[in-house]
Image (cartoon, rainbow, N blue to C red):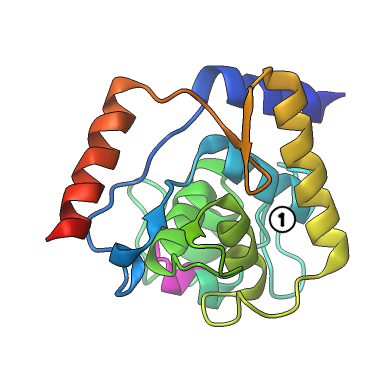
Amino acid sequence: MAFNRWIFAAAVCLAASPLSVAGLPQGVQNQRFEPVTEVCLGCICESISTCDRNLRCEGDVCGMFGITWAYWADSGKPVLQGDNPNDGQAYPRCANDPTCARQSVVNYLTRFAQDCNRDGVIDCADYAAIHKNGGYGCSGYLDPNYKNKYDTCQRSVFELSGSSQVQNNNVQFQQGQQQQQQQQQLQQQQLQ
């Protein structure tokens, strides 16, 4: 199954690609904040579209992450290299490109990071809700089909990775030195 190979590769090779923590939304500083990882992005993508790279615009959503124009705009209007964000076709070109779409999602999740499920931790479960329901509605009803796909993906990653830790239904990987330094910086910022 291509999905399992992809998610396993992400889990093993990429494990956790942390975000910059500068400029976190107000209120985030007082909560435990986990970075968006490649595995998290993979499970969000899998839940939205089975990560179909061939998806284009249909209705008001584009690409494998199902990005709307408003979502893209809220993410800072990232564009392909050399593109102009004010060009009317910049949005679909970005949303249909896996790398640019990924950047849009990371930007959006960082901007709206919050504890949607009120478990005291901002983690992938929250990011999945933010992606699906938006930054202002993430604590609301989450479509059961989307949630089931997300939960199945998280379990698959856990099983394929051999990870011995699962917290809040999210796979926890050993942190590299760079990630440890970034988390220490975040903790220091939280104390200030």
Instruction: Please indicate, yes or no, whether residue 147 appears anywhere in the rendered image.
Output: yes
Q: Which quadrant of the figure contains the C terminus?
A: bottom left
As drawn, is 147 to the left or to the right of 80? right
Please give the name of the residue rendered at 44% of the width and 73% of the height, measured from the top-left corner: 73
In the drawing, does residue 133 fall left or right of residue 189? Answer: right
Residue 145: percent from left, percent from top: 88, 61
Q: Relative to 26, say whether 173 is above or below.
A: above
Residue 116 percent across, percent down from the top left: 57, 70
Q: Position of residue 63 (x, y in %)?
A: 67, 55
Q: Is residue 8 above or below residue 134?
A: above
Q: Amino acid at mark 1?
A: Arg
Q: In this figure, which residue is indicated by the disc labeled 1?
A: 56
Q: Residue at x 81, y 70 (%)?
A: 143
| Residue visible at 54% across and 36% down in the picture | 38
Characterize the local packing of mark 1: few (<14), some (14-19) or many (20 or more) Cα atoms within 10 angstroms.
some
Q: Quadrant of the N terminus?
A: top right
Residue at figure coordinates x 71%, y 30% from the top left = 157
Residue 115 placed where, x, y %? Answer: 50, 67
Relative to 91, 185 lies left or right? left
Q: Is residue 88 left or right of residue 131?
A: left
Which region is colored magenta? 72-78
> What secondary structure is found at the residue carrying circle 1?
loop
Whether residue 89 is visible: no
**Residue nearest the viewer, comparing 170 with 147:** 170
> Quick check: is 16 in the magenta stretch?
no
